[in-house]
């Protein structure tokens, strides 16, 4: 079939422009987050009685995904530095999953983490609150 231009009709015009936006690299956990978030969005729109958990599930899932991202980044940096150095971690660093990663018997690492006040620590073979130990300093 001959094209419209060949028949003497005007050539269609197009226009485009570039918009700056943040694009995340499609890592496995980012793809998992995107798909889980969309599933929760769709489930939240279904006419199901007493469906109130979508916001809570999203919040919980986002926290878990941030933890996975931190562990992934920690592993990448650890490999690049051949596990030399001391980790200094601030917000959210006192989660058990990060502690387990840092205390791994196969590859233990030195670390400093800012703790929340109700975190228990072992000091002189006794379990004590971090806040109580801080007040003694």
Image: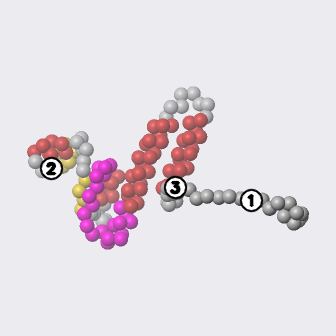
Which tag, 2 or 1, sits closer to the chain's start? 1
Q: Quadrant of the N terminus?
A: bottom right
Q: For the residues marked 3 and 1, what is the alpha-carbon distance in whole angstroms?
A: 26 Å
Residue 24 can be seen, yes or no: yes
Residue 100 position in % (x across, y down): 32, 55
**Residue 70, disc:** none
Nearest the viewer among 123 and 28 is 28
Which tag, 3 or 2, sits closer to the chain's start? 3
Q: Which residues are magenta?
A: 74-94
Taking the magenta stretch, the answer to whether it contains residue 56 is no
The residue wearing badge 1 is 13
Residue found farthest to the left: 136
Which tag, 3 or 1, sits closer to the chain's start? 1
Residue 137 position in % (x across, y down): 10, 48
Query: Total of numbered circles in the picture?
Result: 3
Q: For the residues marked 3 and 2, what is the alpha-carbon distance in whole angstroms?
A: 49 Å
Q: Nearer the viewer, mark 3 or mark 2?
A: 3
Nearest the viewer among 56 and 105 is 56
The residue drawn where x is 18% and y is 49% is 122
The residue drawn where x is 40% and y is 60% is 72
Q: Residues within 10 Å of mark 2 (few under 14, many from 20)?
A: few
Q: Is residue 114 above or below residue 5?
A: above
Horizontally, is 102 left or right of 55 in the view?
left
Pointer 3 and pointer 2: residues touching (CB < 8 Å)?
no
Rendered image quadrant of residue 107: bottom left
- Label 2, secondary structure: give it: strand
**Residue 21, disc:** 3
Residue 3 can be seen, yes or no: no
Q: Nearer the viewer, mark 3 or mark 1?
A: 1
- Label 3, secondary structure: give it: loop
Q: For the residues marked 2 and 1, what is the alpha-carbon distance in whole angstroms?
A: 74 Å
The residue wearing badge 2 is 123
């Amino acid at each position: 079939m001959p094209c419209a231009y060949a028949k003497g009709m005007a050539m269609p015009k197009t226009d485009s422009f570039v918009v700056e936006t943040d694009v995340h690299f499609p890592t496995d956990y980012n793809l998992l987050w995107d798909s889980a978030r969309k599933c929760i969005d769709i489930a939240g729109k279904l006419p199901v009685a007493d469906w109130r958990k979508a916001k809570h599930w999203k919040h919980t899932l986002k926290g878990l995904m941030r933890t996975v991202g931190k562990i992934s980044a920690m592993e990448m940096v650890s490999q690049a530095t051949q596990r030399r150095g001391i980790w200094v971690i601030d917000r959210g660093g006192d989660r058990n999953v990060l502690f387990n990663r840092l205390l791994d018997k196969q590859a233990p690492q030195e670390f400093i983490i800012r703790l929340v006040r109700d975190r228990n620590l072992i000091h002189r073979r006794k379990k004590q609150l971090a806040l109580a130990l801080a007040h003694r300093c």
